[in-house]
């Protein structure tokens, strides 16, 4: 099991963006507006008292939203729910590419070769090719019985992390299902955000209670 460094923030962690020199934490601030904190990646100490808001993609998201509910999008692709069914579209032309089998889904992430979709109400994490073909990744992926409140995939697409409502976090190798880490690093509590560093030897986990944990992976 990896070594932990923990930091208690004031409110729920919504998103984690990990860079070489800082971890940008998006959290619920007082007054119900999103707040931001810039932390040292090794110690989780404050680097500055405030952080610049990440670049917004609101304009593109607004355009895509005319097609339906946007689960995820990048510069090239978008996954959008239309009439209860998820579809892949060109983000530039908005032309349809393929329909995604299964579902319903309520959250998504694009990586280099895959689109990762969470089943509605956190029922499973499913991986598809960028042409919407199902993958054959083993348990705990592609399994509706896996409870997922947050997930992350590293840049190499080798490692996948999943968190659940009881605070349990696992890190597995996507192609084999072999577990690299498993435990409740924050002592329990609904996991709301996960992120790897570039080298995928550190995993960050945030919770609804505002707990942020740095996990050094073996």
Image (tube, helix red, strand yellow):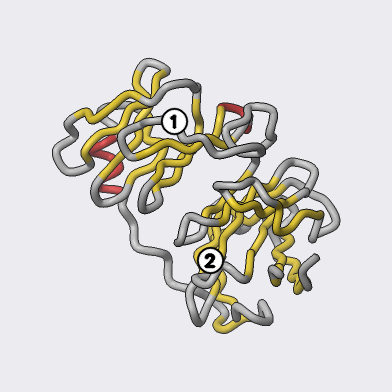
Identify residue for label 1: 134
The picture places residue 132, in percent across and down from the top left corner, at 36, 31
Q: Which mark is residue 170?
A: none
The picture places residue 165, in percent across and down from the top left corner, at 74, 41
Identify residue for label 2: 36
Kindly state the secondary structure of the residue where label 1 is placed: loop
Which residue: 51% across, 69% down?
Answer: 18
Residue 109 found in image quarter = top left
- Badge 2 local density, few (<14 within 10 Å), some, or many (20+)? many
Which residue: 80% across, 43% down?
Answer: 166
Residue 179 in sight here: yes
- Image quadrant in which the N terminus is located: bottom right
Extreme-top residue of the structure: 83
Q: Is residue 19 left or right of residue 69?
A: right
Extreme-front residue of the structure: 176
Distance, label 1 to label 2, CA atoms, is: 36 Å
- Image quadrant in which the C terminus is located: bottom right
The earlier-in-sequence mark between 1 and 2 is: 2
């Amino acid at each position: 099991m990896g070594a932990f460094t923990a930091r208690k923030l004031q409110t729920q962690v919504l998103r984690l963006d990990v860079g070489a020199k800082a971890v940008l934490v998006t959290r619920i601030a007082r007054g119900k507006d999103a707040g931001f904190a810039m932390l040292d990646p090794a110690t989780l100490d404050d680097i500055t008292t405030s952080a610049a808001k990440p670049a917004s993609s609101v304009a593109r998201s607004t355009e895509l939203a005319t097609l339906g509910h946007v689960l995820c999008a990048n510069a090239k692709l978008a996954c959008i729910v239309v009439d209860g069914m998820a579809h892949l579209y060109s983000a530039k032309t908005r032309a349809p590419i393929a329909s995604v089998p299964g579902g319903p889904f309520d959250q998504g992430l694009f990586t280099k070769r895959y689109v990762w979709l969470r089943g509605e109400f956190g029922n499973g994490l499913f991986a598809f090719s960028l042409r919407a073909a199902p993958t054959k990744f083993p348990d705990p992926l592609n399994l509706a019985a896996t409870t997922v409140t947050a997930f992350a995939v590293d840049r190499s697409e080798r490692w996948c992390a999943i968190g659940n409502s009881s605070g349990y976090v696992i890190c597995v190798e996507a192609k084999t299902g072999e577990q690299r880490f498993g435990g409740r690093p924050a002592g329990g509590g609904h996991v709301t955000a996960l992120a790897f560093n570039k080298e995928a030897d550190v995993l960050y986990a945030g919770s609804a209670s505002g707990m942020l944990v740095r996990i050094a992976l073996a």
